[in-house]
Image (spheres, helix red, strand yellow):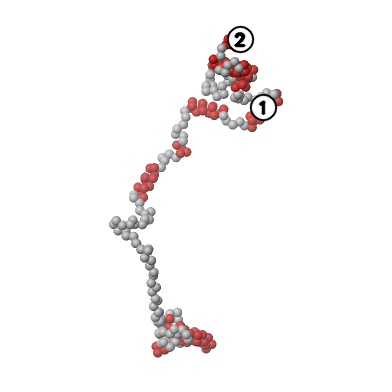
Amino acid sequence: MLKNPRKLVRVIDPRLEGQYPEIAAQKVAALAYQCLSYHPKLRPTMAEVVRVLEPLEDFDDAQTGTFGTKLPVAAKKKVEKVVNPLFEKRPEQFGIGGALPPKKDLHRFVRWPQVVRMKMILKQRLKVPPPIHQFSKTLDKNLATSLFKMILKYRPEDRAQKKDRFFKRAHAEAEGKTPSHFIEEEDAVTDSSDDGSSNTGRQQHPSNSEASAAEAAEGAASAAEALQRRRRKKWRMRWILASGDCCFPAVTNTKRWQKNG
């Protein structure tokens, strides 16, 4: 009852309505209810009564009203909203032929039941895992043997082979031998072929490792002959340009050379 202000109003004499503030009346009613308690220990002492009633003198300026009811609140004035005529409010009409409706959340709507969707997903998956499927297409024994033999030639060298290669190269440099390399200039190619210091018949990338020795020798001879022919033509051109007899060596007369010689 002490926590319910409506029940405390019943303790006050109805003839006192409108003479005291509502908050003060509720506190006085609560104090009077405690004084009427049956048990003596629950009744307040005189000091407690004075301590409660002294602050109630500050409520003289408070609004008074009937006990248990609030005073009517003054009505608020309506503030008219100023509307700019330049900006006309045009609400969207979602009827037939009107604006498009807003997008809805359709994540809960599906076309097929869950069993059908799961079955479709399982059918789309791989039937054999990739780690197992890679062994379904393999080479036969003969092709695999030849492949492994070829790969064995290109395997990286170990430390012992690398040390042996460096040792041989150092010995060759100490003896004054030049390492094997390609010659690109025309003069250097012809000079090296005349001296016999280069092997012009060797194929750098043989297409057939089982070619016969006769074919290799024939190829070397044809390459050497072509280089010799090119060298003679080059020196012939140089001699004609140096003598100044003719600016066009293709139409020169051999008799004129013999005469000048």
Report helix, strand or loop for mark 1. helix
Residue at left offset 34%, top offset 60%: 92
Identity of the residue drawn at 59% across and 11% down: 256
Query: Mark 2 = which residue?
Result: 259
Mark 1 → mark 2, Cα distance in angstroms: 55 Å
Q: In the displayed structure, does residue 242 sit left or right of residue 74?
A: right
Q: Quadrant of the N terminus?
A: bottom left
Q: Is residue 144 above or below residue 2?
A: above
Binning the other alpha carbons within 10 Å of mark 2 as few (below 14), some (14 to 19) or many (20 upward) gives few
| Quarter holding residue 90 | bottom left
Three-letter code, disc 1: Arg
Query: Do the CB atoms of the residues marked 1 and 2 lie less than 8 Å apart?
Result: no
* Residue appearing at x 41%, y 87% in the figure: 18
Q: Position of residue 43 (x, y in %)?
A: 49, 86
Depth check: 170 or 142 in front? 170
Which residue position is annotated with label 1? 169
Q: Mark 2: which secondary structure?
A: helix
| Nearer to us in this view, 76 or 34 | 76
Q: Position of residue 180 (x, y in %)?
A: 63, 24
Looking at the rendered image, the disc whose residue lies closer to the viewer, 1 or 2, is 2
Q: Amino acid at mark 2?
A: Lys
Dot 1 or dot 2: first in sequence order is 1
| Residue 34 in sight here | no
Residue 62 drawn at (x, y percent): 46, 84
**Residue 110 spot, x, y in % from top left:** 35, 51
Please state which of residues 99 and 86 is positioned toward the viewer in this rendering: 86
Instruction: Identify the residue at the far left of this view.
Output: 96
